[in-house]
Image (cartoon, grey):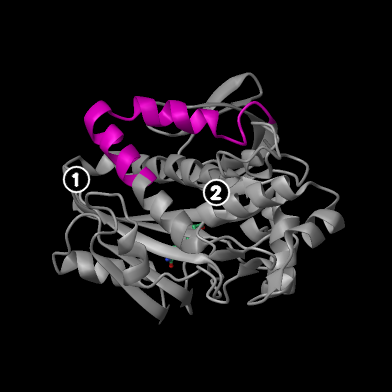
Amino acid sequence: MRAAVFKHLRNNLGEFVSGGEIARALAISRTAVWKHVCALRDEGYQIESRHRYGYRLSEALPDLLIPEEILAGLTTQFCGRCYHYYPSLISTNERAKELAQAGAPEGTTVLAEQQSGGRGRLGRNWYSPSGGLWFSVVLRPVLPQMRAPEATFVAAVAGIEALNGESGGRSSEFGPDQHPVSAIGIKWPNDFVWHGKKLGGILTELSGELDRINYLVIGIGLNVNLAPHDFPTLLRHQVSSLQEILGRPVARGGLLRRYLAALEKWYLVWLEEGFGPVREAWKKGNACLDRPLRVSTPEGELSGRAVDIDRDGALLLETGGDIRRIVTGDLLMGEDIHK
Ligand code: BTN
């Protein structure tokens, strides 16, 4: 319903539309309209209300990712504090690695409105037009290199927390588990999926020696305000976007700030308490355990049932009576498979 209220305001961008008119069109009370307007304001939309005129959505939609906008509401101590914004880049991971190499402090964040050479896992391309959230964060954990893969799980858990914030907390239009974002899950190891469609992913890269991580770059890509026609035809049926899920555009700045705050929180949990709590949170948000699937590994394809993730994040696949540890690979799940 909030999306429908937003649509009315959006259709009359910069002009007043009366609360009574919206209420009649949507068959809800004026009080309900007012509550939805309050919730939209909480999300960052500027909506003026004037006696006898109604509500007016400001033409300045709050979708700015410029440093002034992001730093103003940032609640973190270090994640995003050093913030590099680019209208366009080849890849935020590449730029973040250059900065990390030059000594950039922990938490340094690189964001681009669009990427011309965005990279995904396993050497794939990552399609990154404007409207998405494409950013990379430099971290410097004092840990041996073999623990680096755990950082992807830290970022995935933080992502689920940040995305859940999009359900708007106070909103009463959905029950706690009925909101569309509650169906967003993590597909091992690093995909955000919604009803089997890919919503985003994480690419973790590292520089270090055997017993020491020099730096990690966590690259995060989320399809936010993108419509199906924004994607190449071949991808269209495999991907989704937050805008599609929620039926309204999302204020990317708020989402980015929430993501950075959640990333910092889970990163500190990881450093202080180890991988255990991260693993538990990941399992709660997963979209792939306890279901039949196929896994494409460097050694070939395996079919089975994903039963758990190991203490280092490896996938435990039950296949033909054996439990196989999968350290790297791709899960192949049908479109019907969702959380
Ligand atoms: C995957 O699922 O394959 C991982 C995708 C990661 C994409 C992000 S977008 C921001 C950052 N910069 C890149 O070039 N890649 C990551």
The amino acid type found where label 2 is placed reads Asp
SS state under label 2: strand
**Does the rendering let one see residue 297?**
no
Membership of 246 in magenta stretch: no
Q: Is mark 2 within 8 Å of ligand 1?
A: yes
The amino acid type found where label 1 is placed reads Leu
SS state under label 1: loop
Q: Residue furthest top?
A: 321
Residue 119 appears left or right of 7: left
Query: Is 78 rendered above or below residue 285?
Result: below
Q: Residue at x 45, y 25 (%)?
A: 280
- The residue labelled by disc 1 is 210
Pointer 1 or 2: first along the chain: 2
Query: Is 298 rendered above or below residue 307?
Result: below
**Does the rendering let one see residue 145?**
yes
- The residue labelled by disc 2 is 191
Membership of 279 in magenta stretch: yes
> What's drawn in magenta, residue-wise?
262-291
Q: Residue at x 63, y 77 (%)?
A: 14
